[in-house]
Image (spheres, helix red, strand yellow):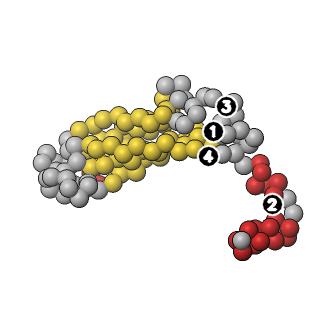
Amino acid sequence: MRTRAIAIALLALVPGAGLALAATGTTLHAVKTYSLAAVRTKTFSVGYPDALEFGGARYSGSVKLLAPAGSAHGSRPSLRKVHVKDAGSTLGDSQYSATIENDNPAGSAPIRVRITATTVLPAGTG
């Protein structure tokens, strides 16, 4: 209740703040985590949520390289030897894809790759 009162007070103090909040669209995320073995290059894809359903929607994505899971077998890999070769929208802007190269030596534990596809819907939708 107290947070609500503070938000209302701030909206009253800052002219146009309510209008700015109402003008922002809805942001949707799709996240998948993959595993990539040593000495491999592979392309991973994640579909954008509500892809191509609304005109004026904006699409983006991100790639995060993660250490292996605690239960992974093999020697500890170096994330410095893992490279994002290519990343961007594919299939007519309906999914985000990234090509990852793992140059760690054979016998290293597989690294994890977390890919996030983000859709920002225009105001008044979603």
Residue at the disc numbered 4: 27
- Residue 103 seen in render: no
**For marks 1 and 2 on the same chain, the one whose residue lies earlier in the sequence:** 2
**For marks 2 and 3 on the same chain, the one whose residue lies earlier in the sequence:** 2
- Measured in 3D between alpha carbons, the distance from the residue under mark 1 to the one under mark 2, in whole angstroms, is 23 Å
Which of the two residues, 92 or 51, is positioned nearer the viewer here? 51
Residue drawn at x 26%, y 55% is 69
Residue at the disc numbered 2: 17
Q: Dividing the image into 4 quarters, which one contains the N terminus?
A: bottom right
Residue at the disc numbered 3: 54
Mark toward the viewer: 1 or 4: 4
- Measured in 3D between alpha carbons, the distance from the residue under mark 4 to the one under mark 2, in whole angstroms, is 19 Å
Is 16 left, or right, of 91 in this rendering?
right
Q: What residue type is labelled 3?
A: Phe
Kind of element beneath mark 4: strand
**For marks 4 and 3 on the same chain, the one whose residue lies earlier in the sequence:** 4
Q: How crowded is mark 1: few (under 14 residues within 10 Å), some or many (20 or more)?
A: some
**For marks 1 and 4 on the same chain, the one whose residue lies earlier in the sequence:** 4
Q: Which amino acid does label 4 sit on?
A: Thr
Percent position of residue 42, x then y? 30, 35
Q: In the figure, residue 6 lies in which quadrant?
A: bottom right
Q: Residues within 10 Å of mark 4 (few under 14, many from 20)?
A: some
Q: Dividing the image into 4 quarters, which one contains the C terminus?
A: top right
